Image (cartoon, rainbow, N blue to C red):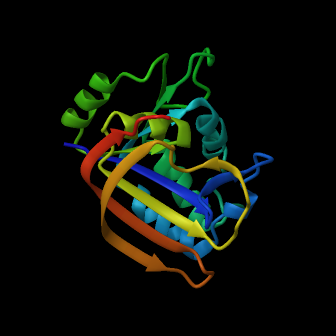
């Protein structure tokens, strides 16, 4: 059975992109990138929202020769070998190999996929992750905290959601990035809105 993992790179104040939609401040250095590669190596399927897919499809074009850094070539190979499922009402066709488009996020279909998978699944995109967390599908949260405060933008976690977590791993990198991994000890619960 595969586990569903939500991984994100966020600012210290919890944003995956700033108020202008930029995330250049989140670009990992070589040490962090190599660590991410090792974290992603066991993933067999990526679940993306449209915007995250449009960002990630860059990895389909990374050169495989020496013109690209070794960590980038390694990640590109990991990404290209994985299956990608994109949840979008507007995309007409996939623009990368091993990619399918789904019009809606079906919790039962995701549960079946997890139950029959011999590899882990990774969620990409805060909005899609919010849906999965709200439905109680996520097994683990992995966060790389970048030493920057951006003051606003898109949060890595939805509001109005209660999650009980257990810290299962952490690491500090030379550049000040901190990695935190949490297992969900109780499935999510939507909090009442005022």
Q: Position of residue 59 (x, y in %)?
A: 61, 46
- Seen as rendered, the residue at the extreme front is 194
* Residue sitting nearer the eye, 107 or 58: 107
Quadrant location of the N terminus in the rendered image: top left
Image point 75% across, 46% down: which residue? 21
Tell me: residue 3, above or below residue 73.
Answer: above
- Seen as rendered, the residue at the extreme bottom is 174
* Residue sitting nearer the eye, 60 or 29: 29
Q: On the rendered structure, is 143 left or right of 166?
A: right
* Residue sitting nearer the eye, 37 or 104: 104
Q: On the rendered structure, is 71 left or right of 46?
A: right
Q: Position of residue 175 (x, y in %)?
A: 63, 81
Instruction: Confirm whether residue 33 shows in the render.
Output: no
Image point 34% across, 33% down: which residue? 135
* Residue sitting nearer the eye, 136 or 25: 136
- Callout count: 0
Image point 49% across, 16% down: which residue? 103
Image point 37% across, 48% down: which residue? 162
């Amino acid at each position: 059975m595969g586990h569903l993992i939500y991984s994100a790179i966020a600012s210290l104040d919890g944003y995956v992109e700033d108020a202008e939609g930029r995330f250049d401040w989140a670009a990992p250095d070589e040490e962090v990138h190599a660590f991410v590669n090792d974290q992603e190596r066991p993933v067999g399927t990526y679940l993306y929202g449209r915007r995250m897919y449009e960002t990630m499809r860059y990895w389909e074009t990374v050169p495989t020769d020496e013109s690209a850094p070794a960590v980038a070539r390694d990640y590109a190979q990991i990404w290209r070998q994985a299956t990608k499922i994109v949840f979008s009402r507007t995309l007409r066709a996939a623009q990368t190999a091993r990619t399918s488009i789904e019009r809606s996020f079906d919790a039962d279909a995701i549960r079946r996929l997890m139950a029959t998978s011999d590899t882990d699944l990774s969620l990409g995109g805060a909005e899609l992750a919010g849906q999965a967390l709200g439905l109680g599908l996520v097994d683990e949260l992995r966060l790389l905290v970048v030493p920057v405060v951006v003051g606003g933008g898109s949060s890595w976690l939805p509001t109005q959601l209660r999650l009980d977590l257990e810290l299962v791993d952490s690491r500090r990198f030379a550049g000040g990035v901190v990695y935190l991994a949490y297992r969900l000890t109780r499935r999510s619960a939507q909090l009442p809105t005022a």
